[in-house]
Amino acid sequence: MHDTSPGTSPDGPDAPEPKYHALALLSGGLDSILAIKVLQEQGLRVLGLHFVSPFFGKPHLIGHWREEYGIEAVNVDIRKSYLEMLVKPAHGYGKHMNPCVDCKILMLAHAKTLLPKYGASFLVSGEVLGQRPMSQRADTLNLIRKDAGVKELLLRPLSAQKLGPTPMEESGLVDRSRLPGFWGRGRKDQLALAAHFGITVIPTPAGGCNLAEAEPAARYLPILQNLAEPAARDFSLSHLGRQYWAGPYWLSIGRNQHDNQALENARRPTDILLRLRDLPGPMALGRQYEPAAGVKPGASPQKWPNDVLADAAAFVASYSPKGRSQSEEGTEAERPVVVLVRQGKGESETVTEMAVTPARETPLCWTGPKTEALAAWKRRFRPTAPERPEPKESMDHPEPADPVE
Ligand code: SF4
């Protein structure tokens, strides 16, 4: 094995010292941490790459990983390329909207491009063979390695003894005999290894990836269906308040003061803000956008017609208890509740007053996201995605979703 002590390069004593020997995918889950620790134990310098997309990523934990685990890491923003992939992942989706195979391919391919920047010569991921029903099967692990173009560059140290030797092990840069051979879904081996490294703070996997969870995936679906070019800000908006769609018209209604403020902050110049003029009630945001091809003919989500605005205003007003009771006291003709509709921003802002009768059921039928719509959509809009055998368990992570290790 090469001497990797400080001041000595694996390429020989006269070669310049690489800043890092390896770049590792660091989700912050236990496996990704252990994969780095076993290499650090061999004297190798490893930089963690923490990928951030609209659906996963905890960039604020960089300092925590350094202090708690002695792991250096940087955030890597892949929002743009991730959204492009998500619209049509070559290997399809998992149970919800999680394109796990393509997600891993994308991250590894991106990590490969960063090797020269950090002077590193190989990549590391914390995947464990057989841990997850599909994305961590041997054939899928091979496919990921091949499609990402990292066949000779990727080391999966936690399952090294169960996988063929890599060039890094064959050259002696990594001591294969000191790597584990984890397999399967159990966590016993990982916990024992964590204890070996003195790790007492075991990261919880919960809430790792919104794409692998039913409720957020249902919120994302109409965005993918309707918007010509969905952006990260659109997916962020889908997490705010109550979400409603009437065909291609998209309305977010605050549930409390915090939501109202967040909606105000999320407002873009092309958005519409609705709020009751004289009574307490929620803030609502209508997002106007360029529709995807094939979106309901005649609809204009890029510029809401007046009847849509009035319908939305009546619906928003129904979330104001005072608005409802005031309306019940007046006659229909009096339409006693006034909603302010603000469009544009800054000097170009216009404010229109709309007198409406609060109504939870309106002609446009605003409805919330439906989890059952996802399966139908995946069949209908992704006919070219390769058919996958139906697994006994979903491709989803068996425990609460955990980002790629
Ligand atoms: S669950 Fe993990 S592998 Fe799958 S899409 Fe999300 S981050 Fe990627």
Image (spheres, rainbow, N blue to C red):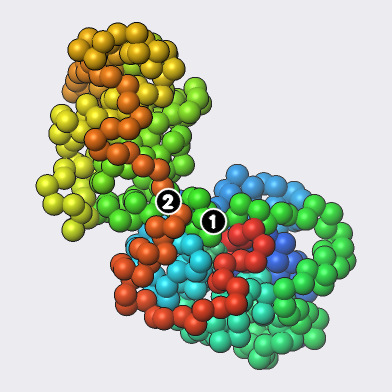
Instruction: Categorize mark 2 by other alpha carbons within 10 Å: few (<14), some (14-19), many (20+).
Output: some
Residue drawn at x 32%, y 77% as measured from the top left:
384
Rendered image: mark on residue 395: none
Please state if 191 lies on the left or on the right of 304 as rendered: right
Ligand 1 in which quarter: bottom right
Instruction: Classify 340 as above or below 152.
Output: above
Of residues 70 and 391, the one nearer the viewer is 391
Identify residue for label 1: 213
The span from disc 2 to disc 1 (Cα, nearest Å) is: 13 Å
Residue at left offset 45%, top offset 34%:
241
Question: Disc 1 marks which amino acid?
Answer: Glu
Q: Using a 10 Å C-alpha cutoff, classify the residue at mark 1 as few (fewer than 14 neighbours), some (14 to 19) or many (20 or more).
A: many
Q: Is residue 350 visible?
A: yes
Q: Residue at x 67, y 75 (%)?
A: 131
Task: Tell me: residue 300, above or below residue 375.
Answer: above
- 401 lies left or right of 97: right
Residue of label 2 = 370
Can you say which quadrant of the picture contains the C terminus?
bottom right
Q: Position of residue 257 (x, y in %)?
A: 49, 22
Task: Report if residue 270 is visible in the image.
Answer: no
Say above or below: 290 vs 31. above
